[in-house]
């Protein structure tokens, strides 16, 4: 019976890949990847040679039926993202949903994902939290921020380096200058950084120190 397996890949440190993930990558029939170049580098590092098929934000709707057909004609297919667990803030969820609707078994291996270590190491309550991923760039952004300002759970956002200061400025505007945040940058990499404090102070820090790399923003809940 056909199966799609979601395989988490390292978010930085290649040692974070699991033995089970390596075995599945070796044994599968084909691999769907967000960026084939990134995935091929990982496979080369692991000494694995497999056919890699692109499945990314620019072709997901067009490629969806073809991808499902290829999975149905294979025994074991794999979906990976560039880093972390497929389906978290990437188009992989569309393929998962289509496979479920087509009666294909879907399995997800445990493994790396950016927001969990960022949350746990932030020092903010992590028994209850709201993961929001990337905020809308334009339409609906203000409405979302107004809603999150009243959230009493810890809030988790993803953000790009060139939008970080803008995002912190808006958090300050909608949630107050004293709202505690933790900006987590380059998780598991050599320049890993946790910057904690009132949003005003953190914003000023990144205005003076242009950020690079992957970023997670943790926001303390209102009542906390």
Image (tube, rainbow, N blue to C red):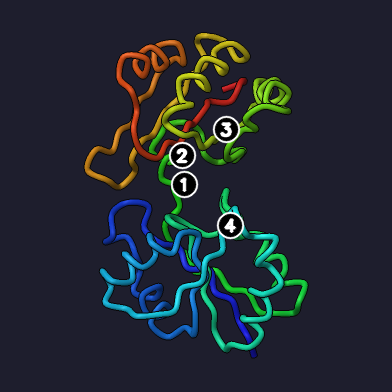
Closer to us: 162 or 216: 162
What numbered label is drawn on residue 87?
4
Q: Does the rendering let one see residue 128?
A: no
- Residue picked out by circle 1: 116
What numbered label is drawn on residue 214?
none
- Quadrant placement of the N terminus: bottom right
- Choose the circle earlier in sequence order: 4 or 3: 4
Work out how far the residue at label 4 is from the one at label 3, CA to CA, in angstroms.
19 Å
Closer to us: 98 or 219: 98
- Residue picked out by circle 2: 119
| Crowdedness near tag 3: few (<14), some (14–19) or many (≥20) residues, C-alpha within 10 Å | many
Q: Marks 2 and 3: CB-CB under 8 Å?
A: no
| Crowdedness near tag 4: few (<14), some (14–19) or many (≥20) residues, C-alpha within 10 Å | some
Would you identify the image quadrant in which residue 97 lies? bottom right
Work out how far the residue at label 2 is from the one at label 1, CA to CA, in angstroms.
5 Å
Would you identify the image quadrant in which residue 111 lies? bottom left
């Amino acid at each position: 019976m056909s199966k799609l397996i979601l395989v988490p890949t390292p978010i930085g440190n290649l040692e974070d890949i699991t033995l089970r993930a390596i075995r599945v990558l070796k044994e599968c029939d084909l691999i769907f990847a967000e960026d084939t170049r990134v995935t091929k580098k990982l496979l080369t590092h692991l000494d694995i040679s497999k056919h890699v098929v692109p499945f990314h934000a620019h072709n997901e709707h067009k490629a969806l039926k073809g991808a499902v057909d290829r999975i149905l004609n294979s025994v074991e297919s794999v979906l990976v993202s560039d880093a972390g667990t497929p389906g978290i803030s990437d188009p992989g969820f569309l393929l998962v949903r289509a496979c479920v609707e087509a009666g294909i078994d879907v399995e997800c291996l445990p493994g790396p994902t950016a927001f969990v270590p960022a949350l746990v190491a932030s020092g903010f309550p992590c028994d209850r939290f709201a993961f929001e991923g990337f905020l809308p760039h334009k339409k609906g952004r203000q409405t979302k921020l107004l809603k999150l300002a009243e959230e009493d759970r810890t809030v988790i956002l993803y953000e790009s380096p060139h939008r970080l200061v803008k995002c912190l400025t808006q958090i300050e505007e909608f949630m107050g200058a004293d709202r505690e945040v933790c900006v987590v940058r380059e998780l598991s990499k050599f320049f890993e950084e946790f910057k904690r404090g009132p949003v005003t102070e953190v914003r000023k820090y990144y205005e003076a120190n242009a950020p690079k790399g992957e970023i997670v923003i943790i926001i303390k809940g209102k009542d906390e």
